[in-house]
């Protein structure tokens, strides 16, 4: 996890302090960008996105993304 450029859904949930269901819901709602990677696609969330969310939480509240 230390050198990876993306988080798995459980990792992102842990970093954000929310449940995995909330992460999946945010991805479905378009509030959290995610990538599908691999032959059997797994969702990955870019670290840069998570870092921005932590730096500017007001921008990422439900429905307030710019």
Image: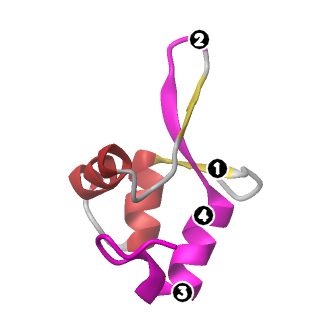
Tell me how far mark 4 sits from mark 2, CA to CA: 23 Å
Of the two numbered discs 3 and 2 in the rendering, the one whose residue sits closer to the viewer: 3
Q: Residue furthest top?
A: 39
Q: Are marks 3 and 1 in contact (CB under 8 Å)?
A: no
Residue 32 x, y percent position in the rendering: 44, 56
Q: CA distance from mark 3 to mark 2?
A: 34 Å
- Residue appearing at x 32%, y 55% in the figure: 26
Q: Alpha-carbon neighbours of circle 4 within 10 Å: few (<14), some, or many (≥20)?
A: some
Neighbour tally class for label 2: few under 14, some 14-19, many 20 plus, Cα within 10 Å: few
N-terminal label among 3 and 1: 1
Compared to residue 44, the image places residue 61 above or below, namely: below
Rendered image coloring scheme: secondary structure
Lower position in the chain sequence, tag 4 or tag 3: 4
**Is residue 59 located in the magenta-colored stretch of the structure?**
yes
Residue at the spot 60% in from the left edge and 64% down from the top edge: 49
Q: Nearer the viewer, residue 57 or 2?
A: 57
Indicate whether residue 62 is drawn in magenta.
yes
Using the numbered discs, state the Cα–Cα distance from disc 4 to disc 3 in whole angstroms.
Answer: 10 Å
Q: Which mark is residue 28?
A: none
Per the image, the residue denoted by label 4 is 49
Question: Where residue 39 is drawn, which disc sits there?
Answer: 2
Which label sits in the foreground, 4 or 2?
A: 4
* Residue at 34% in and 78% down: 61
- Hey, which quadrant is residue 13 in on the image? bottom left
Query: Which residue is the site of mark 1?
Result: 6
Range shown magenta: 39-66
Q: CA distance from mark 1 to mark 4?
A: 9 Å
């Amino acid at each position: 996890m230390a050198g990876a450029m993306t988080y798995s859904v459980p990792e992102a949930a842990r970093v954000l302090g929310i449940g995995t269901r909330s992460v999946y819901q945010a991805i479905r709602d378009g509030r959290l960008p995610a990538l599908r990677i691999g032959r059997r696609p797994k969702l990955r969330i870019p670290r840069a996105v998570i870092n921005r969310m932590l730096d500017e939480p007001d921008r990422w509240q439900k429905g307030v993304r710019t």
